[in-house]
Amino acid sequence: MLDSKVKKQLDTYFQNIVHPIEIKVFTDQSNKAAELAALGQEVSELSDQIKCTVVAADGFRAPMMQIAPLGEKARVTFAGVPMGHEFTSFVLALLQAGGHPSKADVATIDQARSIKQELHFEVYVSLTCQNCPEVVQALNLFANLNPNVTSTMIDGALFKSEVERRNIMAVPTVYLNGEEFGQGRMSLNEILNKVDSGASVKQAQELSTKEPFDVLVVGGGPAGAAAAIYAARKGIRTGIVADRFGGQVLDTMAIENFISVSATEGPKLVANLEQHVLDYDVDLITTQRVAKLEKHDLIEVTLDNGGQLKSKAVILATGARWREMNVPGEQLYRGKGVAYCPHCDGPLFKGKRVAVIGGGNSGIEAAIDLAGIVEHVTVLEFSDTLRADAVLIKKAQSLANVTIMTQAMTTEVIGDGQRVIGLNYKNRTNGDAHLLDVAGIFVQIGLVPNSEWLRDTLELTERGEIVTDAHGQTSLAGVFAAGDVTHSPYKQIIISMGSGASAALGAFDYLIRQ
């Protein structure tokens, strides 16, 4: 299964294993079971510290692999073959079981070890989902650190009966002790905060004791990262506070227009951004949402948990999120057929009929990607013309299982109480109403700025974008803004980075003149 290049890399990684590991593979008669057994055997041959045992399955899941320090009860399990995006999760699980320390900070490790209750996590994934590995790796690390915790990754495409029984239509979906715990990307800190009831108050108290910053960046996407780097290079006290580092880029699969880099993926770019930020003396505060901004002697930023950070200047780089259709049924069936990430959730609709809402680049790219997985894709575009690039339109039109309809306005998401079964749309030319039978609806109609909390604080456009001048200055002195949350006409990674740099330079100029 593994080519010589991968084996050579693994051989290097496995030098970090300090005590023996046991891999136990549970098989049935399926081809996937044979693949998993082969993977376990190949890996064990690369290190004397790894033992692999293959046994017939005696439980309800097969194929399945358990990883544990030799002689200990397994707390990390992979139900399915951990290849694709989950191969890294598999390798990290081996290293951690073998005693190689994680890169998590001491406070996070201590919090994970302090949890006393028994927590049994199951995370349903797609091997093509770029968001899933973060959740799998976070839960595996949690289980490795705490003997009261177990973590099981489940390939939703392989265990379809479970997916259907639990009505899972989006990945990653996490269950805790048999009950749904959450959907979407989650870091270990976010997971810990949800299971540790006292964490929020403690964090609020700790954050409120921090010394004032010279520049505090709100938001951890490309604009925020660039702003922090430029500010820190001036030798001033710089901080970032963000819900999650990386922003929308974490949900971006292919990036082919980042100048000097021919092709990359969002998570890889975010990892490089974070490392670059941490090369400087930047106080990176994550898993925190900002609720309010006020200016007194200093600018005060209040967090959702009640904590408060103060700074001489603030740069707002809160980015944007997927725009919703705002039609009946959308929220009810979100994650139950209504989806926003075709790369993540597309495999769950294999062999089914789906719709894509939006005829821009994102919508047509989604249709092309989904066409290779699902039975049929119908693209519904509100306007009379498609807004996507000509090369994408030509490709989509060449696919036999893609239908493109313009002048189509979605009016309602239809479901059976459990999942999506169709949508209603209106022909804008003649007003006729139609029902489209689909199992999934992928919404790709642009972005909404994350600025609602600033509505009474700063000047915003009608669309909610922050108005700035050429230096990134907003309508409130000392408060700057950058990236997709601003009224910049082009929402591109490289443009956001440039505006982040401009805002940081503008903020520094503001500070030296005070």
Image (cartoon, rainbow, N blue to C red):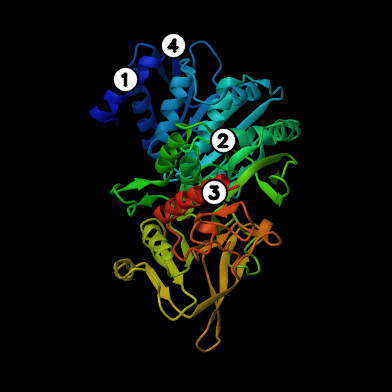
Regarding residue 81, the answer to whether it shows in the image is no
User: Marks 4 and 1, Cα distance to the nearest angstrom?
Assistant: 16 Å
Question: Which mark sits nearer the N-terminus, 4 or 3?
Answer: 4
Residue 148, by quadrant, is: top right
Question: Which mark sits nearer the N-terminus, 1 or 2?
Answer: 1
Labels 1, 3: front one: 3
* Residue visible at 54% across and 20% down in the picture: 74
Labels 4, 2: front one: 2
* Residue visible at 56% across and 68% down in the picture: 422
Question: Against 514, is 331 above or below?
Answer: below
Task: Locate residue 392, reporting x and y percent.
Answer: 32, 66
Residue hosting label 1: 12
Image position of 500 (left or right of 214): left
Residue hosting label 4: 20
Secondary structure at numbered mark 2: loop
Question: Which mark sits nearer the N-terminus, 1 or 3?
Answer: 1
User: Marks 1 and 3, Cα distance to the nearest angstrom?
Assistant: 45 Å
User: For mark 3, does the 10 Å Cα neighbourhood hold few (<14), some (14 to 19), or many (20 or more) residues?
Assistant: many
Question: Which mark sits nearer the N-terminus, 4 or 2?
Answer: 4
- Type of amino acid at the residue the image marks with label 1: Thr
295 or 362, which lies in front? 295
User: For mark 4, does the 10 Å Cα neighbourhood hold few (<14), some (14 to 19), or many (20 or more) residues?
Assistant: some
Question: Which mark sits nearer the N-terminus, 3 or 2?
Answer: 2
- Type of amino acid at the residue the image marks with label 4: Pro
Q: Is disc 3 in contact with disc 2, using a CB cutoff of under 8 Å?
A: no
Residue hosting label 2: 237
Residue 374, by quadrant, is: bottom left
User: Marks 4 and 2, Cα distance to the nearest angstrom?
Assistant: 45 Å
Labels 4, 3: front one: 3
* Residue visible at 69% across and 59% down in the picture: 457
Q: Which mark is residue 507?
A: 3
